[in-house]
Image (cartoon, helix red, strand yellow):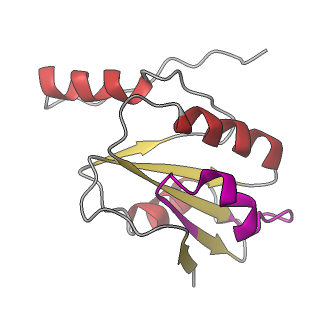
């Protein structure tokens, strides 16, 4: 059973729920969160699901990100990508769910562009172009 804790109270219904699965890559996770701090579009919550990582992130390590609406979910074992995302999605409050890898670092206009796309093409599915960071 997941253990849920909230670092900041969420808005009732943010536009986006960003789901990030975490497993054993702490150095990337914080770079990812730094990129979310710089988003132009601010109407989102973040759900971080620790998928049974042997290197869990402590709640105090999220202090730098207090302005972000972060909810953490901890699993005792790694249930895989699909099951982990489904568990996090069950706790999402956003109108739209966005899956983001913890080793992805989106540009500041990333969510703004997705929101524009939704407005223009409301019945479509969107994916982001992935480029290796190095």
Can residue 65 be found in the magenta stretch?
yes
Asked whether the viewer can see residue 130, the reply is yes
Residue that lies at the very extreme toward the bottom in this rendered image: 1
**Left/right of residue 101 with respect to residue 119 in the rendered view:** right
**Left/right of residue 19 with respect to residue 74 in the rendered view:** left
Q: Quadrant of the N terminus?
A: bottom right
Image quarter of residue 11? bottom left
**Left/right of residue 125 with respect to residue 88 in the rendered view:** left
Q: Quadrant of the C terminus?
A: top right
Q: Residue at x 26, y 46 (%)?
A: 15
Image quarter of residue 92? bottom left
Q: Which residues are magenta?
A: 51-72
Where 16 falls versus 71 (above or below)?
A: above
Where 27 falls versus 65 (above or below)?
A: above
Asked whether the viewer can see residue 121, the reply is no
Q: Residue at x 54, y 38 (%)?
A: 37
**Left/right of residue 28 with respect to residue 5 in the rendered view:** right
Where 23 falls versus 30 (above or below)?
A: below
Can residue 9 be found in the magenta stretch?
no
């Amino acid at each position: 059973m997941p253990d849920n804790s909230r670092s900041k109270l969420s808005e009732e219904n943010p536009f986006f729920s960003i789901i990030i699965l975490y497993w054993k890559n702490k150095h990337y996770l914080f770079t990812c969160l730094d990129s979310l701090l710089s988003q132009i579009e601010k109407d989102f919550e973040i759900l971080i699901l620790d998928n049974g990582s042997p290197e869990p992130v402590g709640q105090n390590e999220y202090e730098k990100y207090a302005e972000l609406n972060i909810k953490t979910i901890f699993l005792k074992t790694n249930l895989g990508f699909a099951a982990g995302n489904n568990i996090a999605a069950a706790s999402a409050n956003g109108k739209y769910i966005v899956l983001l890898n913890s080793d992805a670092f989106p540009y500041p206009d990333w969510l703004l562009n997705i929101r524009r796309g939704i407005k223009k093409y409301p019945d479509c599915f969107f994916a982001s172009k992935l480029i290796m960071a190095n």
